[in-house]
């Protein structure tokens, strides 16, 4: 029996490039499919920086809330929020890069 995805969920995600360590913020209704698209060079803005990995995901019940959150996370203030929210992850990641 095919696995069904939970309908009516909308996701805001943050990817990190494993090449340049920069972030990409986006929106989708299918996280697995979207990551595959990014990593197979189907997105113009990320194709030169593959591979990517999810480092943060939020779920919303409707598209409007998710896209509003995506827009916020793309602002300077939203970037600050992410750096505070992901402080331990980012610190661990920097330690791994230095070794």
Image (cartoon, grey):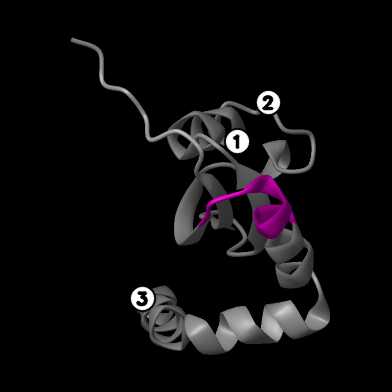
Please report the bounds of the magenta region as a residue range: 60-67
Labelled pair 1, 2 in contact (Cβ < 8 Å): yes
Labelled pair 3, 2 in contact (Cβ < 8 Å): no
Q: Between label 3 and label 2, give the one nearer the viewer.
A: 2
Determine whether the residue tagged by mark 3 lies in a helix, strand or loop: helix
Determine whether the residue tagged by mark 2 lies in a helix, strand or loop: loop
Picture quadrant of residue 2: top left
Q: Residue at x 32, y 23 (%)?
A: 4
Query: Which disc, if any, is residue 96?
Result: 3
* Label 2 CA crowd tier, 10 Å (few <14, some 14–19, many 20+): few
Q: Which residue is mark 2?
A: 42
Q: Give the alpha-carbon distance from disc 1 to disc 2, as whole Å.
A: 6 Å
Q: Which residue is mark 1?
A: 38
Q: Earlier in the sequence, mark 3 or mark 1?
A: 1
Left or right side of 69 for 19: left
Q: Residue at x 36, y 81 (%)?
A: 92
């Amino acid at each position: 029996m095919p696995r069904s995805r939970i309908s009516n969920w909308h996701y805001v995600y943050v990817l990190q490039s494993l090449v340049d360590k920069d972030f990409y913020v986006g929106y989708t209704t299918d996280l697995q499919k979207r990551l595959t698209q990014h990593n197979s060079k189907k997105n113009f803005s990320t194709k030169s920086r593959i591979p990517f990995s999810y480092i943060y995901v939020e779920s919303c019940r409707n598209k409007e809330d998710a896209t509003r959150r995506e827009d916020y996370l793309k602002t300077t203030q939203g970037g600050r929020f992410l750096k505070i929210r992901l402080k331990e992850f980012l610190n661990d990641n920097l330690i791994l890069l230095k070794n």
